[in-house]
Image: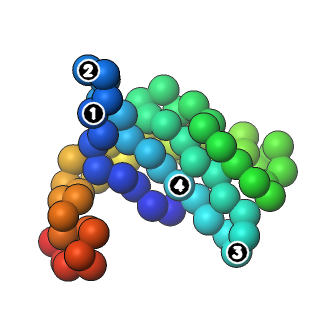
Amino acid sequence: MLISGIIRKKGEKFVRVSFQRNKDMAEYILPECRLDKSRGFSKEELKQLENYVKDDRAQIMEEARKVNPMKAMLGMKE
């Protein structure tokens, strides 16, 4: 699971959460927990991932607040 930092666009704040398994991927937008794109996961698996991001939304958003985009881009530890 990969969590972006807080993204600001057109006055809105959101976070992208990506799940990867080999060539399969799914990406959700929080705080809405909306599936943005996917490839390779079954409908049942996507529902399980959606339930996970809904249940852990507060913790995921908190982790996103800690992401430093420059350090992440440069591969530096926090």
Residue at point 29% right, 50% down?
Answer: 5
Q: Which mark is residue 8?
A: 1
User: Could you say where residue 77 lies in the image, as x and y percent from the top left?
Assistant: 19, 78
CB atoms of marks 1 and 4 within 8 Å: no
Q: Label 4 belongs to which residue? A: 18
54 or 29: which is nearer to us?
29
Q: Earlier in the sequence, mark 1 or mark 3?
A: 1
User: Could you say where residue 56 lies in the image, as x and y percent from the top left?
Assistant: 44, 43
Relative to 14, does residue 39 appear above or below in the rendering? below
Cα distance between the residues tagged 2 and 1:
6 Å
Q: What amino acid type is highlighted by mark number 4?
A: Ser
Give the side of residue 53 with respect to residue 9, left or right. right
Do we see residue 48 in this rendering?
no
Cα distance between the residues tagged 4 and 2:
23 Å
- Furthest-front residue in view? 10
Cα distance between the residues tagged 4 and 3:
13 Å
Q: Which mark is residue 11?
A: 2
Q: What is the crowding at mark 1: few (fewer than 14 residues within 10 Å), some, or many (at least 20)?
A: few
Q: What amino acid type is highlighted by mark number 3?
A: Asn
Q: What is the crowding at mark 4: few (fewer than 14 residues within 10 Å), some, or many (at least 20)?
A: some
CB atoms of marks 2 and 1 within 8 Å: yes
CB atoms of marks 4 and 3 within 8 Å: no
Relative to 76, does residue 6 appear above or below in the rendering? above
21 or 37: which is nearer to us?
37
Residue at point 67% right, 69% down?
Answer: 21
Cα distance between the residues tagged 1 and 3:
30 Å
User: Could you say where residue 38 lies in the image, as x and y percent from the top left?
Assistant: 70, 48
Q: Label 3 belongs to which residue? A: 22
Q: What amino acid type is highlighted by mark number 1?
A: Arg
